Image (cartoon, rainbow, N blue to C red):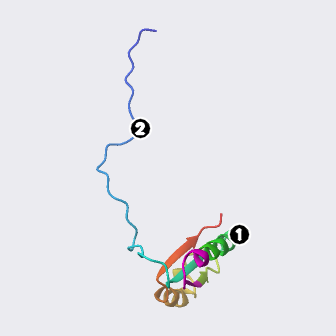
């Protein structure tokens, strides 16, 4: 039992990049129009109900616009695409609920 073992880290050595979203986050939510996107899964609507209640209690003047998929496919692959694109243009930011 006198062997020598080399222990290696499972983490790769990489240059860390700062995390950033697709678009910049809004600096303030007061008075903003928030889009709530429902992915058509069972728990998505109740999750967004809770998110909406929290947003309204924390940020004065918040309005909410909801959009939900009608099927389990990309919106781009449905007849809802034009309505979706119009919805996105009408909100300041979006919260997506994945209700699995």
Q: Quadrant of residue 11?
A: top left
**Front in this rendered view, residue 69 or 52:** 52
Q: Which mark is residue 42?
A: 1
**Front in this rendered view, residue 62 or 16:** 62
Q: Position of residue 73 (x, y in %)?
A: 58, 75
Q: Which residues are magenta?
A: 55-65
Quarter containing the C terminus: bottom right
Query: Is residue 15 positioned above or below 8 on the image?
Result: below
Query: Is residue 31 positioned above or below 39 on the image?
Result: below
Q: Position of residue 84 (x, y in %)?
A: 53, 86
Q: Residues within 10 Å of mark 1 (few under 14, many from 20)?
A: few
Q: Position of residue 39 (x, y in %)?
A: 61, 73
Q: Label 2: which residue?
A: 10
Residue extending farthest top:
2
Q: Residue at x 65, y 81 (%)?
A: 70
Q: Position of residue 60 (x, y in %)?
A: 54, 82
Q: Is residue 7 found inside the magenta-colored segment of the image?
A: no
First in sequence: mark 2 vs mark 1? 2
């Amino acid at each position: 039992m006198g062997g020598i073992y080399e222990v290696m880290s499972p983490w790769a050595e990489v240059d860390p990049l700062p995390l950033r979203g697709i678009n910049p986050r809004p600096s303030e939510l007061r008075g903003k129009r928030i889009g709530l996107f429902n992915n058509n899964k069972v728990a998505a609507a109740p999750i967004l109900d809770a998110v909406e209640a929290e947003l309204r209690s924390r940020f004065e003047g918040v309005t909410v616009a909801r959009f939900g998929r009608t099927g389990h496919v990309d919106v781009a692959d449905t007849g809802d695409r034009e309505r979706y694109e119009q919805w996105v243009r009408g909100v300041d930011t979006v919260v997506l609920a994945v209700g699995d």
